[in-house]
Each structure stands twice: as structure tokens, then as C-alpha cells.
Image (cartoon, grey):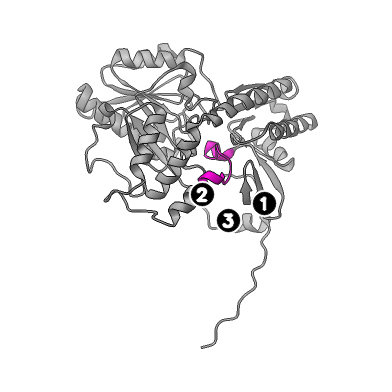
Amino acid sequence: MTAPARVPVRTRTSADLIRAEEPVLAHNYHPLPVVVARAEGAWVEDVEGRRYLDMLAGYSALNFGHRHPRLIEAAHRQLDRLTLTSRAFHHDKLAEFAERLAALTGLDMVLPMNTGAEAVESGIKVARKWAYEVKGVPADRATIVVAADNFHGRTTTIVSFSTDETARAGFGPFTPGFRVVPYNDLAALEAAVDETTAAVLIEPIQGEAGVVIPDQGYLTGVRELTRRTGCLFVADEIQSGLGRTGRTLAVEHESVVPDVLLLGKALGGGIVPVSAVVADREVLGVLRPGEHGSTFGGNPLSAAVGTAVVELLETGEFQRRAAELGVILRDGLAELVGKGVLGFRARGLWAGVDIDPALGTGREVSHHLMREGVLVKDTHGSTIRLAPPLTITAEELATALGALERVLRRG
């Protein structure tokens, strides 16, 4: 039988690839028109070989940059041995991952999952189970208090307590059991908590809302209120955690320890999706076999990569880098206030920048920056967010700030 002739593969341009996506991919994203083919550190390269400085870092999933050598090495090592067992069996990487992650956070137990939304969903289930079994809330009456303008994911339950109509509209009926209060408002929070409250679920810094940082004392107040009223403080650190703000966790800026910690994004090192619910034994101990699970949660590959991520954070190097370089970022943005920047909020290597609407929307500014070789993403209106890899250098930060200044100057 004659072998079929080989058909030469034509090099496809960015425009070709973007057009190819249109009929076959669901339109749940509106990406910038750049097609990334390679990456290293803080830089990505498109299919035509153009290089861009990545100032988004996968919404904090790439805290350690693209293809960090220690993380790639850990992944390669594990790929040669074992990738998946399911939780039907034990494997030799899970205990170390759980032990080291628990020690890093100062809590007792780890529930490994995959995505950030899955960690939030798991945290909600755990909080409700705890409320019924430990607090004594009557069956099916547990409530969870959340903050307006939150972003915890886009599953059906999570959008039930979103205040973003783009995320909610057309997806009802919604899951009951949530009370929404204004963010950074302790009085409103206290008014919403009662004997049915299982937990208060908040982001220590609201990322999708535009890197909104609460007043000093807010997180301390949440911790005191939840202790006093006998409910759990659940901190969603999926974007803010693991070095991003100059501390291992954003709650550490107020020396607060939540009851439940939700982690994801950077925990997978930009290689595999890894998330976790971390809590003390009194809380996570309410789960029993069969009540919750995940085929891929805590798999050998993710545990190996997650352990390597924890090892990087154990040194404190990346937290220090985020704090020190965050000063450069903050000072550079301060120089642009009144020159096209109306204001900004920054903590470590994370900033929400409000651009003068007269100069364009956040998406338009993102397009202009892309043409300057810098990748960012808008949040709402004329706000863009900056979240570069923690491996970025001071010179690379200056490059990004210089590009922003040129874009603003041109209007």
C-alpha cells in the first residue's frame, strides 16, 4: 500500500490563527490580537517572532514567570515517572505537597483541587458542612456573606452572588444562601451576619474589580467580627496570594490568619492547574470519604509542581522582590498621575490604573500598549491592571512604564 504524500505545512500567521479560532471556539473571551507561540521569564513571543513584555502574568498564574527552570525541571522529572492515579490510590508526592503548603500558610490541612473556581466551590461546601456539624445551624439554612464587586469565578453557584451582570445575565435560576454587602464596609458586614452565617467570603484585595485595596484595619475587623459571631473567615487569595503583594499572603499585611484559605493560579507555576483549600483540622476535618472529590485534584504531576512552587516561596525571595520592585512600580505610576492617569491602587507587583476616559477605554489602551510591545489587560471601563511576573527586573519595569507614558502622551 502506497503511503499518502506528505502535505507541506504552511506557516500560519497571527491573523490566520485568529481567524481559524472564530468558527470553532466558544466566544467566552475577547483576547487581544496577539498569538503567543513561545515564552521565557517575563517575555512572550508571537508566531511572527515579535516579543512582548508580559505585564499580566496570566492573572497571577505566572508569578514565577514563564517556564521557570526549577518548575520546569520538577515537571519533567515527574512526567518521566507518574502523572495520574486519581485519589482512588495514594501516591508518593501528595503528602509532601500538603505538609509544605500547610506549613507555608500556618494552617493544618489541605484539600487539593484544580482550578480557582473549584477551590471556591469546595470552600463553600466545607463552610456549609462546618456550619451544620460544628456551629449547629439548622439544615439547609446556612448563609454566606460576600462582598459586592467580588470575583470568585464563573460557575453557576459563584455567579449567583456576583454583582457583575455580564457574568450573571442569562444564567439563572441562581443558588440561594448568599448575602451581598459593600466591600470595605464593616458596619454593613456586621448587619448581615446572624446565627445562620456559616462564613464571610472575601478577597483581601479585589483583583477583577480593579485591584481594590481595603482600608487598613478592614481585614482585622473582618477577623474580629467572624470570631465574635462564631462564623468562618474565608479568604480568597487565588489572585492576591503566593507572593504577589510582597507577602506570601495578602492578609499578612494586617497580620490576619483566616479560618479558610483559597489558593490557586500561581500554585501551579504556570504549568498545570493547581488549587487548594487550606484550613485547620476543625474545619476541613468535617469532610468524609465520598462527600467531595476530584479525579485530578492532587495528582502526582500537580503535587510535584506545587511542591516546587512552595519551595520557591519558602526562601522569601519572591516576596521580597515583589515588595522592592513594587516601590518602583508605585513611584512610576505616581509620576503619571495628572498625565493621563487619574489614579491607581498598588500593592507589591499588582496595580489597578485608572486611565483618563478621554484617552480611551481600558481595552483601547491595552491595544496601544500591545503595539508598544507590552501586554496588559483591562478590567472595567478605563481601568487596566498590571501584574507582571515576580521575576521581572527593574529595567523591564521601566520599559513597561515608559511604554505607558508614551501611549498616554499620544492620547
Badge 1 is on which residue? 46
- Proximity of marks 3 and 2: CB atoms separated by less than 8 Å: no
Q: Nearer the viewer, residue 46 or 117?
A: 46
Which label lies toward us, 1 or 3? Answer: 1
Ranked by sequence position, the earlier of labels 2 and 1 is 1
State the quadrant of the C terminus: top right
Q: How crowded is mark 3: few (under 14 residues within 10 Å), some or many (20 or more)?
A: few
The residue drawn where x is 32% and y is 51% is: 86
Q: What stretch is highlighted in magenta?
A: 57-73
Q: Nearer the viewer, residue 174 or 410?
A: 410
Badge 2 is on which residue? 73
Q: Residues within 10 Å of mark 1 (few under 14, many from 20)?
A: some
Q: Where is residue 42 in the image (x, y as percent from the top left)?
A: 63, 41
The residue drawn where x is 55% and y is 31% is: 318
Numbered mark located on residue 21 in the image: 3
Ranked by sequence position, the earlier of labels 1 and 3 is 3
Q: Distance between the residues labelled 1 and 3?
A: 16 Å
In the structure shown, which secondary structural element does the residue marked by tag 1 occupy?
strand
In the structure shown, which secondary structural element does the residue marked by tag 2 occupy?
helix
Q: Quadrant of residue 379?
A: top right
Q: Distance between the residues labelled 3 and 2?
A: 32 Å
User: How many marks are shown on the rendered structure?
Assistant: 3
Kind of residue at badge 1: Asp
In the structure shown, which secondary structural element does the residue marked by tag 3 occupy?
helix
Kind of residue at badge 2: Glu
Q: Position of residue 207 (x, y in %)?
A: 52, 29
Q: Would residue 386 be visible to someone looking at this image?
A: yes
| Residue 398 falls inside the magenta stretch | no
Which label lies toward us, 2 or 1? Answer: 2
For this view, does 399 lie left or right of residue 293? right
Q: How crowded is mark 2: few (under 14 residues within 10 Å), some or many (20 or more)?
A: some
The answer to whether residue 104 is above or below residue 88 is above
